[in-house]
Image: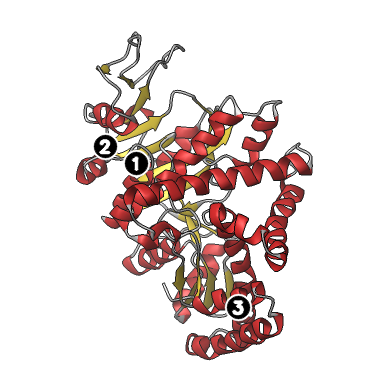
Amino acid sequence: MKLWLRFDPGTRSFGRVLVGGAPLRVLRLSAAGADLVARWRDGAEVGEGKARRTLAGRLIDAGMAHPDYRRSSLSTADVTVVMPVRDFDGPLPAGRTVVVDDGSRIPVEGAAHRHETARGPAAARNTGWRTVTTELVAFLDADTEPVPGWLETLLPHFEDPAVAAVAPRVRSVPGPSALARYERVRSALDLGPDPAPVRPGGRVTYLPTAALVVRTSALREAGGFDEGLRYGEDVDLIWRLVAHGHRVRYEPAAEVLHAPRPTWRAWLEQRFRYGTSAAPLARRHGRRAVAPVRVSGWTALVWGLAAAGRPLPAAALALGTAALLPRKLRPVGLPARRSLLIALRGHLGAGHYLAEALTRTWGPLAIPVLAARRKGRVVLALALARHLREWAVCRPGLDPARWLLARVADDLAYGAGVWRGCARERTMAPLIPDLSSWPGKP
């Protein structure tokens, strides 16, 4: 199948050196490779041949470029929809759909399968997909509304035999309430407007099963969903697929709408429950997969000094460590000035991620501790200021005060769930940062 590439907006070219991806990568090209990349950027087809496909695959896996197959040999007839329901009284979808009733008090009429008692969404999805005979399975929640053409947009990705799963963008249904307006721009299911490979440590780290298309053979290989997980079973499946060597993609050109929780209380409970999944996932996939923040150890020290009220040593350390990166990247041919800018931007960008962890995962402990100290209140105010900057960018239709209250409540509910999960699993893994090194080579 013919393949084109869409280069990520964050990918930069410096002669025969490419910089981009997430986490940030530096790739040195041969003269022939640089010529190919230049032609691909101009819209040329990747073409056949092992060398071309290997280079394109490296760019795709690094997140520097995204695949564009444009057509698919598959059709919607190759897909069976599996929909778990419980106490559902709405109309069931028509077409090739397997509805699984997970222990409803009143049996759902028309369901293909029924659990006498509720066993959870993982078990319901397993019951459904194990009866499927088509090449692909599309998982959809009952409260979703697919935008026409969503499936056709995802199918071309499966022209790559290494791709095991692809998900659309899941956007919250617009509404007039404050909660609906907040969810429209901050839904936990909405992974943003940019395509990406999906893996732990990447820009997109998981996919929700509110809407997800998976190869049936890959599901069989992985054993389906882990029914021991009440929350995070979708994250676990994606990470196991990646660990088995499969590619997983996020494609926001396809969209599915999702109904938000009806009340603030139900919404906070949802966020709390999402947080409780971090510790069980750490048990299964290691602490690095669920680390609240990934930064260089030097960067963490820079921001630690700044938070302790020592800005001059922090600035000196930031400049000193940044000056080391050009020497490290000199062998790959990246200009020293560009290396220095990468290092400095890395320090600055890490401040955002540390502030996010401070008020979210670490928030239940960090916020009261910081609020009790004068210097701590300054740090806390700076950390919270990013929420107002976010408000200014996304313009959610809420006034700044209500937006800030909702963002803080969102963070604290999730963080409280993380701490509750840690206590239940007797592990601190989801609270420990991953102090990674400088950008590496793909």
Q: Looking at the picture, does residue 423 appear above or below residue 372?
A: above
Coloured how? secondary structure
Judged from the image, the secondary structure of the residue bearing numbered disc 2 is: loop
Q: Dividing the image into 4 quarters, which one contains the C terminus?
A: bottom left
Marks 2 & 1, CB-CB < 8 Å contact: yes
At horizontal 30% and vertical 23% (from top left) the residue drawn is 118
Q: Which mark is residue 320?
A: none
Q: Looking at the picture, does residue 418 appear above or below residue 355?
A: above
How many neighbours does mark 1 have within 10 angstroms: few (below 14), some (14-19), or many (20 or more)? many
- Residue that sits furthest to the front in the current view: 372
How many neighbours does mark 2 have within 10 angstroms: few (below 14), some (14-19), or many (20 or more)? some
The Cα–Cα distance between marks 3 and 2, rounded to whole angstroms, is 43 Å
Sequence-wise, which precedes: disc 3 or disc 1?
1
**Residue beneath disc 1:** 233
- In this orientation, does residue 37 appear? yes
Asked where in the image residue 102 lies, by quadrant, the reply is top left
| Circle nearer the viewer, 3 or 1 | 3
At horizontal 31% and vertical 18% (from top left) the residue drawn is 103
**Residue beneath disc 3:** 302
Asked where in the image residue 428 lies, by quadrant, the reply is bottom left
At horizontal 57% and vertical 86% (from top left) the residue drawn is 321
Sequence-wise, which precedes: disc 3 or disc 2?
2
Q: Position of residue 95 (x, y in %)?
A: 37, 18
Drawn side of residue 369 relative to residue 215, left or right = right
Judged from the image, the secondary structure of the residue bearing numbered disc 3 is: helix
Q: Position of residue 304 (x, y in %)?
A: 59, 74
Q: Looking at the picture, does residue 1 appear above or below residue 295?
A: above
**Residue beneath disc 2:** 227
Amino acid type indicated by mark 2: Glu
Most foreground residue, 124 or 421: 421
The Cα–Cα distance between marks 2 and 1, rounded to whole angstroms, is 8 Å
